[in-house]
Amino acid sequence: MDNISEEFSSIYLEYSSKIKSLCFGYTNSIHEADDLTQETFLSAWKHWDKFNGQSSRTTWIYRIAINKCLTYIKKNESKAIDIKEIEKVLANNDEKNENINLLYKAINKLENIDRLIITMFLDELSYKQIAEVLGIRENSVAVRIHRIKLKLTEIFNNYEKI
Amino acid sequence: MKKFDDLKSIWSENQLNTNDLAHSFGNKKINSLAVIKQQYILSAIGLFGTTVFILWFGFLSGKNFKFDISYTALGILAVCLVIIVSINLYNVFLISKLDETLAPKEYLKHWLNFYKKRLRFFRLYAPILLITFCISFALYIPEILGYYPNTDYKIGFIFFMILIFFASYLMGKSATREEKIKLNELNDTFQLLSNG
């Protein structure tokens, strides 16, 4: 395996699950999240040479994924979240499923761009990385995330009460 | 009552499974941009085929029309179709130039420009094309109605014209509405990103 293939494989192994979560939080469909994840990595492979090293590969991959999601929304209307679909693909099938179902449901209640931002934050990307991915200032990201965190927690707790 | 840190732990403990994903690589053609491009290309091919058929029917099939004006009508119709084909191909060109590796804000800016151009087309040029279409049909109607000697020509003509005009107007209006929705969606996301 050459260097590029090796680098691509390691990035794929490390980020495919996270990119899929990002896409799922955005599309509410596992099948479409699968498609978008595949599209993201296919595009990354196709444009591998375009990477200029100004940011990290991680931010670069996330950029492609987010752009894919933004293109996706133009073709498809948003759908109601399918909880059974989540259960099928969760790595751990235990009682924690209920919480993750609620979390996805709560994420789904956010604005389109907020869903993407909070998913990146939950995936432990730093403010700096998120700012690089989106092409906005770090301060703006911090303010925005603070607001989304409050909103998401509130929505989650409301769902939990029901 | 959970805090945000609890949600973070829920998230990190439940990663989505991507085992099946690796095996399905290369099995499907799923590129979103490719799909959008394909729609424009297919539409262009369909319209180009129609243009070729109209030109063949009007000028090469050896069919003799009763009225000379019918040739002009088909000629105008073919020109309108060629213009729409060119616009579709121009859209394909614009989409091909989109760079998915750009920062989303920049990427959205390109999409916004694309949809603004499309909207401008619907607002300014589509009505002109619609009127030209109607004129060409109007010029061709005597040829159709000419084969029915008992038909009241004037009533038939007016009825046909109203029908075409409304059909085209409604189609144009619905297309403009769709474009506006897309443009607004993109604009909202763009504004959210720009305002931080």
Image (cartoon, rainbow, N blue to C red):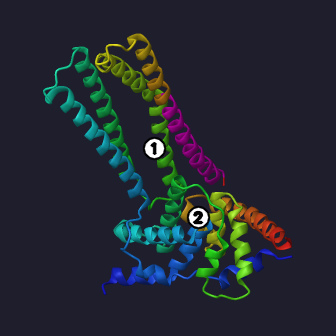
Give the position of the N terminus of chain B as an image quadrant: bottom right
Which residue is disc 2 drawn over? A27
Where residue B16 appears, as percent x and y from the top left, is: 58, 80
Residue B128 in which image quadrant: top left
* Chain for disc number 2: A
Q: Quadrant of the C terminus of chain B?
A: bottom right
Give the residue displayed 29% in from the left and 23% down from the top. B76
Does the magenta portion include B29? no
How many badges with numbers are in the image? 2
Residue type at mark 1?
Answer: Phe
Asked if residue A106 shows in the view, the reply is yes
- Left or right, residue A131 beside residue A151: left
Q: Residues within 10 Å of mark 1 (few under 14, many from 20)?
A: some
Question: Tag 1, which chain?
Answer: B
Q: Going 31% across and 15% down the picture, which residue do you hit?
A: B142
Return the x and y of residue B15 as percentages of the image width and height. Answer: 61, 82
Secondary structure found at label 1: helix
Which secondary structure dominates the residues rendered in magenta?
Answer: helix
* Relative vertical location of residue B156 with respect to residue A117 in this rendering, above or below: above
Q: Are marks 2 and 1 in contact (CB under 8 Å)?
A: no
Q: Residue at x 38, y 12 (%)?
A: B153
Residue type beneath disc 2: Thr
Nearer-the-camera pick, B150 or B95: B150
Where residue A119 appears, x then y in whole percent?
63, 70
Q: Mark 1 — residue?
A: B114
B35 to A31, vertically: above or below: above
Q: Residues within 10 Å of mark 2 (few under 14, many from 20)?
A: many
Name the residue rendered at 46%, 29% in the picture.
Answer: B168
Is any part of residue A129 visible from this angle? Answer: no
Magenta residues? Answer: B169-195
- Going by the picture, which residue comes out furthest to the front? B150
As rendered, which of B184 and B103 lies closer to the eye?
A: B184
